[in-house]
Amino acid sequence: MSKEKMKNIKTAGFNLKPDDKNIKTLFNKIKKQFENKNIKVILEKKSANMIQEEGIEFNQMCEKADFLVSLGGDGTLLSLVRNSYGYHKPVVGINAGNLGFLADITIDDVEIFLDQLLKGEYRIDNRMMIEGYIKTKENRTKSFFAFNDVVITRPVVSKMAKIDAYIDKEWFNTYKGDGLIISTPTGSTAYNLASGGPMMYPLTEAFILTPICAHSLSNQKPLVLPADFTIELSSLNESVVAVIDGQDSYTMEKGDILVIKGALEGAKLLHRKERNYFSVLREKLSWGDKH
């Protein structure tokens, strides 16, 4: 577990959940709490326009802020982590959404969190990121980073996806069905879990390959791989769709190759020191009563 600490806690860059009628009121309340602790608040431009406030460009916010704050649900945090990844700034999620596996600071806990933050009573978790690219048969490439997962799936409901999978250049399986999820441990509680894949402790470094509605049960089971393997996926169909963190999608034609590996650096998630992953699982998944 990382013992990394921030050099400064003077400026927080905020990104807000889009299309939430209550977000302006929440933001103004939290902004005042930050400023009362002498932490300057800067707001990303699109979020600022949404609530009729002053803001700056996203890249400027990332450069100027000592840490970044997502005010929203897990989707808002996911987007902020991905888009700010190159700046390697710690990101904390204040939960104004519903489930909140990642955005774990509640609105009521903001004051406590800030007091602990200024006392150095926090931790920074390094979460595995996926680094990948799509190489077309014309030799063009499209690079990306993913925090939760990469999903390769059929383009239309009426078609079955047929996906050839290679590990370190060696063929090991052809997946037939609705598609395949390649998840990080952080993303293991998302689409992977809903599709029957295993949950993994989020600081583990591994890939989880989980078939979606497999058409053959004999060779279509979830598989966990160390993060130092390189995975290559290609389609035996005319086309499939690669979806990155549920937010960006790319059409892959026959002959295109999706290449996935573990990124050299993880994403930095800022948490309260006492946050316990297993307590979060018990709460969010309504696990059994304590005896």
Image: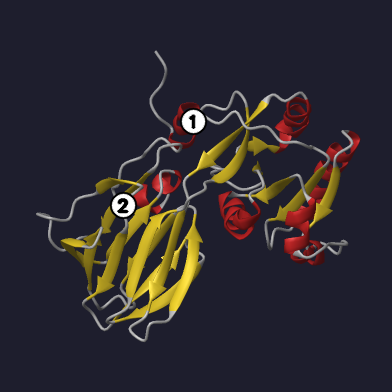
Instruction: Tell me the crowding category of disc 2: few under 14, some 14 to 19, or many 20 or more residues within 10 angstroms, Cα based.
Output: some
User: In the rendered structure, which amino acid carries the disc numbered 1?
Assistant: Tyr
Estimate the x, y position of residue 152 in percent, counting from the top left.
Answer: 34, 67
- Residue 95 lies in quadrant: top right
Secondary structure under tag 2 reads loop
Which residue has dot 1 on it? 277
Estimate the x, y position of residue 98 in percent, counting from the top left.
Answer: 57, 46
- Up the image or down, 93 lies above or below 53; here it is above
Q: Nearer the viewer, residue 82 or 281?
A: 82
User: In the rendered structure, which amino acid carries the disc numbered 2?
Assistant: Phe
Estimate the x, y position of residue 180 in percent, counting from the top left.
Answer: 29, 61
Q: Nearer the viewer, mark 1 or mark 2?
A: 2
Q: CA distance from mark 1 to mark 2?
A: 26 Å
- Residue 235 lies in quadrant: bottom left
Quadrant that contains the C terminus? top left
Which residue has dot 2 on it? 229
- Residue 259 lies in quadrant: bottom left
- In this orientation, does residue 232 appear? yes
- Up the image or down, 215 lies above or below 155; here it is above
